[in-house]
Structure formats: C-alpha cells, structure tokens
Amino acid sequence: MTETADILEELGPWQRPLRAQFPIIVANPELAYLDSAATAQKPRAVLEAVQHYLATSNANAGRGSYPWANATTAAVERAGDRVKEFLGDPAPDRSSVHFTSGTSEGLRTVARDWLAGLLTDGDEIVVPFADHEANLAPWLEVRELLERQGVKIRVRELPYQDSSGDYDPAALAASVGPRTRFVAATHVHHVYGVDMNVNRIRRVVGPEVPICLDAAQGVGHVPFSVAGLDVDFVVFSGHKALALPGTGAVWARGRRGPRLRPGGWAGTPNTVGIVSLAAALDWLDAAGTDRIEAWTVALAARLTDGLSQLGAYEVLGCRSSLAAGSEVQRRRSIVTFRHRAIPSRDLGFILYSHGFMVRSDGHCQAGAGDADGSVRVSLHVHNTSEEIEKLVGTLRSLQ
Ligand code: PMP
C-alpha cells in the first residue's frame, strides 16, 4: 500500500499534464472513464494529426502520382515502420506489418492467410479456450475450413491454472507433441488483467513452433518489445492504443511474414486510422509506456486493495498487492469483480449513476458460462487516484 502511494505521489506531476491532453476527459470532470480495455480515449495530438492529414493531404494510398497521393502513401509506409519501432523490432528489415481493422480481424488474417495453408492431416494446434473469443473463433474456423477439404486437424486447449486465470505451462507439456504446429496465446488477459508471461510457453514448445500473440491489452498500455518476447506474430488494436477505431496491425517476424498477403491490405486502406495510429504511438512513446504502466498498475493495486477490505465483492483473477514477489506484480491495468448479491449489469448501471463508466457483462470471454458476467474496471494514464478512491467509497456504500 505504501509503495502504491509512493508511486502515485512520485508520478503525479508527470500524470496531471497528460490527463489534461484528453479533451473528452477534461470536458467531463464529473465522469470517470474506466473502460480503456474496451477502447481508449484519444489525446489531442491524435485528433490534431487526423485533422491535419485530412485538411492537407487526404488521398488514396499506393495510387496516383500527385503530391497528396504520394504523401498518403508515404504516411502509410511510415506508419508501418513506426509500428515496428514501437514494438521494439530488432530486425525491421526482415519483419512485416499488415494493417487491419483491429485484433479480431488481425487474428483472422493470421488464421486465414497463413495458418490454413500450413496445416496437413493429423497436425495439432494449441489455443486458449477462456481468453477473448477473438482469439478462439479464427482457429476453430481453420479447423472447419480444412475439414471441408478432407484435412483433419486437432485443436488442443492451452491449459489454465485453476484460480488465477493464468496459463499452466506444466500442464501444457502434456498437450504438446511432434504434430504441434502452432500456438495462440494472449499477452495480458482482458478479464483478469494478468500478464500471461508467454515466454514460459516458448520454453515448453521449443524454438520451432510458431506462436501468435493477441496483444490487444498490452500494446499501448505497457512497455512492449518483441526483442524480449519470443513470438512470431503480434496482433493488436490501434483503438485500444489511443488511435481511431477500425485500426490495428499484425506484426510478423521475418521467417513467417512473407506468406501473409504483401502490402498489408486489399483495396483502400484505412488511411486516417493509420495516420492516427502513428500519432498515437508517438504520443505513447513521448509519455513513456513504462510510466503509464507504473501509474495504472498502482491504481489497479489501490482498487484491488480497497476491494479486498469489502466483504461483498469477489475480485477475479490474481490477488493484488505490489508486495515484492507477489503474484500481483503481474496484474496490469484491469480489475474485474462481482458483488455477491447485486447482479453485475445492475451494478454497472448503479456505478454509472455515480459517474463511473465501467464494463459489466461477459466481456466476450470465450466459454464464459456465467450469464451475469462481472464488472471490469480498466485504466489508462488519464485516470486518477481520486477516481479510484471515489469508486471504492461508492462500492463500500453498496455493500
Ligand atoms: N483480444 C483481446 C484480449 C481483447 O481485449 C479484445 C477487445 N476487447 C479483442 C481481442 C478484440 O479487439 P477488437 O475488437 O479491436 O478486434
């Protein structure tokens, strides 16, 4: 708790001017936006980059020979380089970036344009059954597609530990064999907020099996570097990383990349979204993703610490505290909970009546059996400890 307070106090002077750069946040001081895992608010620099682009050089990319068209083509190419740089790509000349509308379409692109052409009868793939459904449906579709062609593949579950929402690398060993051709995993769980520590999966599956990472809740929220992350695809949503909706990307490490469609899009790309993504990544780098992570993790810890004092609530996923070595060091900016008596959807409405915008449903979690779902609070740099204290106070009053 003390450590949390120290972090928040130390970073306060850095955070306040950044919060002031979000027009929608500044315009609504009575509201607390606590749903950044669904989509993130946009800083002024992103809005200005979009307006500047549309007001000065809007045209189609890769077509035409006049200055606006050339400027658009250059902006899209620059954005691809910017994505590689932001992801800490150690070999940008060997990798590729493919723009998509978001993570769902990005994962589907990897499935359809790469994985489906790789598998043969009897092959196995290992995928998560309780992460976001966007990271399950495309792999099941590959199985169906191949089955229609007379090719049978086996889809195995990437196993979880019982209580924390974390993967179970020890159990994974039993699901991996000589026919394992592919693993899909998630970077940060969108319900439990846990960093799923995908390098443990690499250690189990060995160096040759391609791994595709759903980084929707990582990129734009925490420092992210493919230099230290041994995966072959990284898929993320630009709109969760402060860019416009309809924007996202697949990064493919060189040895897998060439089989994705070259050029990155069929038809006219989302040029405005791509321009906004480059501006958002610039903004995030200038703000410092390490400090954004420290700030939001401290706020999440404050919330879980507060909730742990309130007997009426159950926090999902790992327990929270910033104590050294505790499991919670790996919780990021997402805290999901239930009230033991108030249905989650009702709790969501009640919280909005107090000015808190949270998500309250099943969060598109694959296989989520509980129709009532839960309440998810997800944070970004504009959130404050005052908002969290007010939220904990409101939750206390609802006990
Ligand atoms: N994966 C995860 C982990 C997510 O949190 C989300 C968004 N909720 C998605 C995939 C899907 O992202 P999008 O809607 O941008 O395609």
Image (cartoon, rainbow, N blue to C red):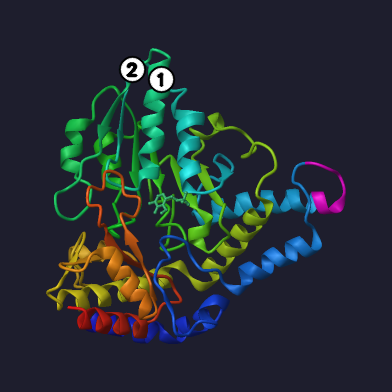
Residue at 28%, 84% (x, y): give it.
5
Where is residue 181 drawn, in percent x and y?
A: 34, 27
Residue at 75%, 52% (x, y): give it.
72
Where is residue 215 drawn, in percent x and y?
A: 41, 51
Please provide the residue range marked out in magenta: 63-69
Where is residue 279 drawn, in percent x and y?
A: 62, 63
Disc 1 marks a residue whose amino acid type is Leu
Q: SS of the residue at dot 2?
A: loop
Residue at 37%, 25% (x, y): give it.
143
Where is residue 141 drawn, in percent x and y?
A: 40, 30
Badge 2 is on which residue? 152
Residues at badges 1 and 2 in contact (C-beta under 8 Å)? yes
Q: Which mark is residue 381?
A: none
Q: Is residue 320 magenta?
A: no
Quadrant holding the N terminus: bottom left
Q: Earlier in the sequence, mark 1 or mark 2?
A: 1
Residue 366, quarter of the rendered image: top left
- Depth check, front residue: 225 or 390: 390
**Outermost residue toward the left in this view:** 311
Q: Is residue 67 magenta?
A: yes
